[in-house]
Image: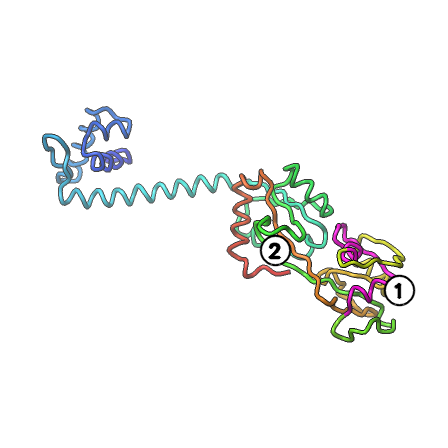
Amino acid sequence: MMNLLHWRLLVAVADASNISRAAETTGMTQSGASQAIAQLESSLGFAVFVRERRHIGVTALGEQVIEHARIMLSQLSAIRVLADESRGLKGGRIRLASFPSVTSTLLPGLLRNFRRLHPGMEVVVLEGTDQEVEEWLAADTVELGVVMNPAPGRAEVILGQDAWVAVMPASAPHIGQSGANGITLQELADQPFVLATGGCVVNGKSLMEQSGFHLSDVRVKVRDWISACMLVREGMGVALVPESALPAERRGLSVMPVIPPLHREFGLVCSPSGKASGATQALLNGLRKGQGNISG
């Protein structure tokens, strides 16, 4: 009866043109290999090999048999690779660090699609500030981290971007000279200001300083974007907020684009353990394939 070893031996003999070398390759004795070939040819009902003085040749029918054997062995190898990868991924766990505004906007759809494709894998989301995300990545305590404004080439996948907008009380007189097209940072800098950080280093204050301006009248500082918008509605001042963090209910608020436009970009960065993790790479590959569908 033919088994997998017979087919491996068949291909090895054809490649080596020598039974001894083929036997060594497949871990058989020479006599065992000779008997196996004889059994195989008897089962097939025709000769696969031609025994010559110095080497083993292949018959015309034998060529066809060996070609089919190669294909079969290649397919079996592919099945084994697939099974091994599946075992490596099943039960896998990915620790993904992010900050709240991204956790609630960009990540839910991405993670839902990933869990649908890989139901046996778990993604644990850890929330922190952008500084904490960087610290966790550096300490290798997470596999992936969402990094704001990553340096070129650092991020494995760019998740998306959103614009900074100015939020003002709807009842307040119009600020600045730019009209309905937007408002500049310079025009905002001298206004009573509600400073919202979102738990991030990049916020209204840092944006002003990077552009050479200074907030002259910070009335209150809060972490939450929505809280800042509520305070603006109450007339406490103006605020700079990411567009994706605006409240659904904007009654009492006036929202204007900043000119020139300012954006923040989000990228997924791998830690050393993430680069070596099959589960993490599966997540990243899935995101790359669906890059065109990723949005905030």
Image: 175 above or below 280: below
Number of callouts: 2
| Depth check, front residue: 7 or 211 | 211
Q: Residue furthest front?
A: 212
Image: 66 above or below 38: below
Residue 9 screen position, x and y as percent: 24, 33
Residue type at mark 2: give it: Leu
Q: Regarding mark 1 in the picture, which secondary structure is present there?
A: loop
Q: Quadrant of the N terminus?
A: top left
Residue type at mark 1: give it: Glu
30 on left or right of 214: left
Query: Mark 2 and mark 1 in contact (Cβ < 8 Å)?
Result: no
| Residue that numbered label 2 is attached to | 159
Residue 91 screen position, x and y as percent: 55, 40
Residue 202 screen position, x and y as percent: 74, 53
Residue 10 screen position, x and y as percent: 22, 36
Q: Is residue 4 visible?
A: yes
Image: 166 above or below 268: below
Q: Quadrant of the C terminus?
A: bottom right
Distance (Cα) linking label 1 and label 2? 34 Å
**Which residue is drawn at the image coordinates 23% and 45% (left, top)?**
67
Q: Residue furthest left?
A: 53
- Residue 192 is a magenta residue: yes
Q: Regarding mark 2 in the picture, which secondary structure is present there?
A: strand
- Label 2: few (<14), some (14–19) or many (≥20) C-alpha neighbours in 10 Å: many
- Residue 103 is a magenta residue: no
Please tell me in which quadrant of the rendered image residue 94 appears.
Answer: top right
Please tell me in which quadrant of the rendered image residue 106 appears.
Answer: bottom right
Give, as a single range, the part of the protein colored magenta: 183-209
Return the mark for residue 234: 1
Q: Earlier in the sequence, mark 1 or mark 2?
A: 2
